[in-house]
Amino acid sequence: MKILCISDETDPLIYSKNIVSRYGDVDLVLAAGDLPLKYYEFIISSLNKPLYFVFGNHNLEFLHQFTSSSAIVQYGYSDGKGEVQVLPAFGGDFVDGKVVYDKRNKLIIAGLGGAMRYNKGKHQFTEREMFFRVMKMVPHLLFNRLFRGRYLDILLTHAAPLGLGDDSDRCHQGFATFLTFMEWFKPTYLLHGHIHLHDLNANRHTVFKETKIINVFQNYMLEDPSLGKDSANGN
């Protein structure tokens, strides 16, 4: 399987008329946050491949439209009954706080966006809050283990795990909860952004237990033929 992974900064090699010749053979796209939705729209319309994304701690102008509490708008009835859910005209799949199954690629993806709480900004979480976000995923993860032979394939985050590719300041500190997640559910990959790489040749890879951790800042191509196999049913 070939996956185009993106995060944090738009890449002129992707945002170009040559995107199809460069990336037309990917199976899907994973976005780890802090990118504008119009960038995702360009990629989807150009490649016609699935795109799954989480939000980071920047470019959050549409975040409220993907949350259940605020994705409702009124469209003019005086009795207040004219309400409809309105989301941006956008073809990507929001996986922040969710566990999803890509049938085409037989791939299980879970998403945990946001950053460590460092001020009163949006989409920031304490360690405790992130842990409870994980706990909400547990029923879906157990279902996957029972019926698909593994909990998940890829955990897509914005922040890094604590002590593994994160930074020392509060904003860029990683989550210990992600370490617990990897111990319990053993994803093949944890893909994150948030930590900018000033040298794109710098090491992006870390390993924790059975999980390969990759910083996908800007652009990273993940190729792994072993991904996308449902061992429980033999497919």
Image: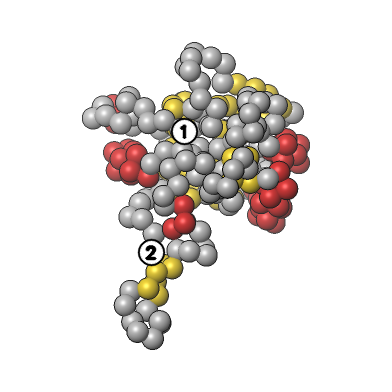
Q: Name the quarter where the C terminus is drawn.
A: top right
Residue shown at 57%/16% (left/top)?
203
Residue shown at 51%/25% (left/top)?
196
Does the image show residue 154?
A: no
> Total number of numbered labels?
2
Residue 111 placed where, x, y %? 57, 45
Determine crowd level at label 2: few under 14, some 14-19, many 20+ residues with C-alpha closer than 10 A. Answer: few
Q: Which residue is mark 1?
A: 7
Residue 185 image-quadrant placement? top right
Which residue is more in the foreground, 155 or 49?
155
Q: Which residue is mark 2?
A: 86
The answer to whether residue 1 is above or below residue 40 is above
Residue shown at 70%/52% (left/top)?
132
Residue 16 placed where, x, y %? 27, 29
Residues under numbered marks 1 and 2 in contact, where contact means CB atoms less than 8 Å apart: no
Residue shown at 37%/45% (left/top)?
37
Q: CA distance from mark 1 to mark 2?
A: 25 Å
Q: Secondary structure at mark 2?
A: loop
Three-letter code for the amino acid on which mark 1 is drawn: Ser
The answer to whether residue 90 is above or below residue 42 is below
Q: Secondary structure at mark 1?
A: strand
Q: Is residue 64 left or right of residue 192?
A: left
